[in-house]
Image (cartoon, grey):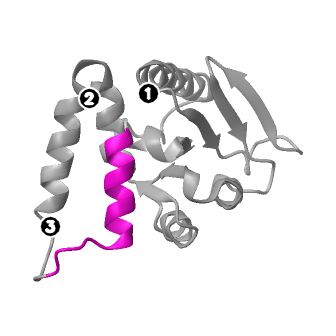
Amino acid sequence: MHLIIDGYNLLHVTRSLTLLNSIELQWERDRLIDQLSAYRQVKPYEVTIVFDGWQAGWKTEKKEWRKGIEIIFSKLGEKADEVIKRLVKEKGSGAIVVTSDREVSRYAERMSAAVIPSDPFSEKMENSALSIQKDLEEAEEERSSKRKGPSRRLSKKERRFRNAIRKL
């Protein structure tokens, strides 16, 4: 499995980034990378986190590895969403996309990749070291209570989501 994470989208879950200067923003990115690294020790997935660089970035896409996490900054004029879409197209159904962006979510689902919204993933990441099994059971109960109608088989989207949650 390969986790592809919309970096700023996930950071916005825990705090507002609008009033941060560049040093504070870098500190928040580093903190997120530390959390992902700890999560990766519990669940050894490949992890790629993509940050926007389209407004104040480099002329070319910048990639680096830190603590086992691949970090990508999109190039000047390109949004992180486009980089994520490209990665999803490359990885296909072997990817799990972490984003709350509707456009990216729809694209990933069309490419048969599982999508996890940023809120639930943030909670999973924070609680992973303590109680992974308990969180998985709660997520299963929450998702199963939303079913409607007499159908006994879940939709493909729902099955992909459950498989992704189970693997996290």
Q: For the magenta stretch, what is the residue range?
A: 151-168
Q: Is residue 10 above or below residue 69?
A: below
Asked which secondary structure carries label 3, the reply is loop
Viewer-closest of 141 and 69: 141
Viewer-closest of 141 and 85: 141
Asked which secondary structure carries label 1, the reply is loop
Distance from the alpha carbon under mark 2 to that under mark 1: 10 Å
Name which of mark 1 and mark 3 comes first in the sequence: 1
Query: Percent from the top left, x then y, of residue 33?
Result: 54, 24
Is 124 placed left or right of 40 in the picture? Answer: left
Viewer-closest of 26 and 63: 63
- Residue at the spot of label 2: 132
Q: Is residue 49 above or below residue 148?
A: above
Magenta stretch: includes residue 162 = yes
Numbered badge on residue 146 = 3
Crowd around label 3: few <14 · some 14–19 · many ≥20 (10 Å)? few
Q: Residue at x 63, y 43 (%)?
A: 50
Asked which secondary structure carries label 2, the reply is helix
What amino acid is labelled 1 in the image?
A: Lys
Q: Are marks 3 and 2 in contact (CB under 8 Å)?
A: no
Q: Are marks 2 and 1 in contact (CB under 8 Å)?
A: yes
Query: Percent from the top left, x then y, of residue 112?
Result: 53, 66
